[in-house]
């Protein structure tokens, strides 16, 4: 099953694409595992997630923490912290 990954703001700019469809390895169970796997895919991902603690994630449009399970997710989005204004 493919999962759609969506990237916003400077995460998108660093990776160089707004979204992609991926087939996740079986050992990728959480958002944190996904970030680790993405970082292994190339320097653009390494750069986008160099400070993992500030990049936020949403699974199927629900904001989640890094330890959230992603099995069965249709879409996972990554974005930097948002500021009010």
Image (cartoon, helix red, strand yellow):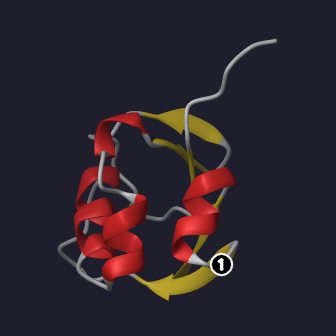
Q: Residue at x 59, y 84 (%)?
A: 21
Element carrying mark 1: loop
Corner quadrant of residue 16: bottom right
User: Seen in the image, is 57 located left or right of residue 66?
Assistant: right
- x then y, percent, for residue 57: 50, 44
Q: Quarter of the image containing the C terminus? A: top right
Determine crowd level at label 1: few under 14, some 14-19, many 20+ residues with C-alpha closer than 10 A.
few
Which residue in the rendered view is the most extreme toward the left? 27
Which residue in the rendered view is the most extreme toward the right? 85
User: Seen in the image, is 41 located left or right of residue 16?
Assistant: left
Q: In this view of the protein, can residue 75 be seen by the observer?
A: no
User: Seen in the image, is 83 located left or right of residue 32?
Assistant: right
- x then y, percent, for residue 56: 48, 39
Q: Residue at x 39, y 72 (%)?
A: 45
Q: Nearer the viewer, residue 41 or 69?
A: 41
Corner quadrant of residue 20: bottom right
Which residue in the rendered view is the most extreme toward the top? 85
Q: Nearer the viewer, residue 18 or 71?
A: 18
- x then y, percent, for residue 26: 23, 79
Q: Residue at x 68, y 52 (%)?
A: 9
- x then y, percent, for residue 61: 68, 44
Q: Residue at x 40, y 57 (%)?
A: 70
Q: Which residue is mark 1?
A: 17
Corner quadrant of residue 39: bottom left
Q: In this view of the protein, can residue 39 be seen by the observer?
A: yes
Asked if residue 55 is positioned above or below residue 39 in the image, the reply reads above
How many numbered discs?
Answer: 1
User: Seen in the image, is 16 located left or right of residue 45?
Assistant: right
Q: Nearer the viewer, residue 71 or 18?
A: 18
């Amino acid at each position: 099953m493919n999962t759609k990954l969506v990237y916003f703001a400077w995460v998108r700019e660093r990776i160089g694409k707004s979204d992609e469809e991926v087939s996740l390895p079986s050992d990728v169970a959480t958002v944190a595992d996904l970030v680790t796997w993405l970082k292994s895919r190339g320097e653009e991902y390494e750069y986008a997630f160099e400070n993992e603690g500030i990049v936020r994630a949403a699974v199927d449009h629900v904001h989640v923490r890094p330890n959230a399970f992603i099995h069965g997710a249709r879409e996972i989005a990554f974005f930097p912290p948002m500021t009010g204004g």
